[in-house]
Amino acid sequence: MKQLNSTIAQVTQRIIERSYSTRNDYLTQMQQQYGVRVKRQQLACTNLAHAMAAEDTKTKIMLKQQEAPNIGIVTAYNDMLSAHQPYYRYPELIKQAILDVGATAQVAGGVPAMCDGITQGQTGMELSLFSRDVIAMSTAISLSHNVFDGIVCLGICDKIVPGLLIGALNFGYLPTIFIPSGPMPSGIPNKAKAEIRKLYAEGKVNSSQLLESEAQSYHAPGTCTFYGTANSNQMLMEIMGLHIPGSAFVSPNTPLRMALTNYAAKQVVAITHANKFTPLCEIVTEKSLVNAMIGLLATGGSTNHTIHIPAIAKACGIILDWTDFADLSKIIPLLAKVYPNGDADINQFHNAGGMAYIIGELLNNGLLHNDVKTVVGDGLSAYIQNPQLVNNSLVWHSATNIDSEIIKPVATPFAVEGGVKLVKGNLGRAITKVSAINPKHRYVKAPAKVFMTQDAVITAYNQGQLNCDCVVVLIYQGARANGMPELHGLTPILVSLQDSGYKVALVTDGRMSGASGKVPHAIHLYPEAVCGGNIAKIHNGDMLELDLENGILNILISEQQLEQRTLVTADLSGNNKGLGREIFKNFRANVVDPEHGCLSLF
């Protein structure tokens, strides 16, 4: 194993120094609870009677004695999300596994879980980003009964895992394990699905054909098989040591999946105060968060995590920014090609060696911190192995790379720099998923076409107004304006324009998607339009330059001209009403910028 890369060491050290005061305050607060809250002795008899009233006799006896650990299960189960549908039976399985090792478990509470795939392009998408903060608060409410010695979090998809982790970090003195449900079996190839979407945008297939394609792609319980935010979540939990090793991408309803769930349930008991105490606050550290950023870069993961990782860090007193991502990206090679960065799906990625191989390559080349704690012990050595069932028992074996079209070693990567990059200039700071974009498309210099809604872009496309070299500029899509909905519905039309030979790009203060790809883009741009950002000073026809290789985004007018321009304004009153948007008014008013997590809680 090589010595830690000097850039990683430098970035980590500056994060430690930057966060010294806030991190110290957080750890002091957590450490004051070590060995106090976990014993439940502060409960009055009435409190305890309520807490155990619905339990069976055996569990009541154990809770009365207050000696055995009691684990709180926080679940994001619903059967509208394919990834979360398998969680239906998990609580009873987890309870039994925990009883088998002499402890108890209770469902502490449920958190909401919405699907961006269902709300994409719909009004409900305006609630999506803020649902993360609601999930964090719901997690805190679930754990507020203060009768738990450890936490099991059941969640998979986009805002749900970050929300659960942010909430759990407020109880960081408790050991915590995340248990995934795994990806659905592979359906039609993601590349074929994307082609049908493009053909539909071009009017070459009808809605029935599109629906048939989509239904063949999203067809069973489990996570969607492309490498978007949901699967990037699982990558993060793996590389941060919050999963049982190798468990991220094992399919639902299989013997291996059930065995891993059973193992995880017992393991959370093993790291409670009664055993080898490993609280969450000692796992999520500056070093493990740097590992999370590295994992994102090395695999070309979701751009949404340039928002979520800083938010998670903030919840435990650590301050990250996009410069940290940018500096790491310069020295982290791209080791994976998973759709939309390549043709493979997440099942093929896992079968090729998956996260275990990636972690092993990064560790052996000095590109990960190994001096971290995990839910299974110190260091990441356990995470370079994948699990198997042998004679009904779990065994782990070292991962090997069996498909170099999907995974590469550090010595011969797909690219020498990471998959997510910072772009900046006189319009502000933004993010791009460069790994998904062909090098020949990474530089665009073209006139701006300015829009205020996603529908207006689609209308212009249908009318032939975008049949030219252009940079589509979509403004008033930031978190303060309308909750920062994903704009994934633009992907098919922009791909169609690019495939027709036009030089096109997207610049927006909104989000694209965990599936951002193919078309050059600068997203999460801030300051956003509603905050007086220069994006609201762009006029139709202004020349914009987007250089993804060098991380540059500029409007090509003089500084004086830019300063003298007035902002284009928009009537945003329609964003305040309907489908629950009314109750998110305070979230929009108090949210911070995307570089610092789009949090409205702290």
Image: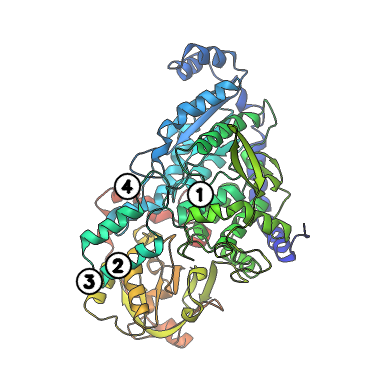
Residue marked by disc 2: 454
Disc 2 + disc 1, Cβ < 8 Å: no
Percent position (x, y) of residue 506? 39, 74
Residue marked by disc 1: 602
First-in-chain label (1 vs 4)? 4
Determine the residue positioned at 53% across, 56% down: 349
Determine the residue positioned at 49% across, 18% down: 47
Tell me the mark number nearer the camera, choosing from 2 and 3: 3
Q: Amino acid at mark 3?
A: Gly
Percent position (x, y) of residue 190? 40, 61
Identify which residue, 597 or 80, lies in the foreground: 80
Q: Amino acid at mark 2?
A: Gln
Residue marked by disc 3: 203
Asked which secondary structure carries label 2, the reply is helix
Tell me the mark number nearer the camera, choosing from 4 and 3: 3
- How far apart in space, not on screen, are marks 2 and 3 (Cα)? 18 Å
First-in-chain label (2 vs 3)? 3
Q: Report crowding for label 2: few under 14, some 14 to 19, many 20 or more residues within 10 A (C-alpha).
A: some
Q: Report crowding for label 1: few under 14, some 14 to 19, many 20 or more residues within 10 A (C-alpha).
A: few
- How far apart in space, not on screen, are marks 1 and 3 (Cα)? 46 Å
Tell me the mark number nearer the camera, choosing from 1 and 3: 3
| Left or right: residue 453 compared with residue 245 | left
Identify which residue, 243 or 50, lies in the foreground: 243
- How far apart in space, not on screen, are marks 2 and 1 (Cα)? 30 Å
Identify which residue, 53 or 341, lies in the foreground: 341
Q: Is residue 332 above or below residue 156?
A: below
Residue marked by disc 4: 583
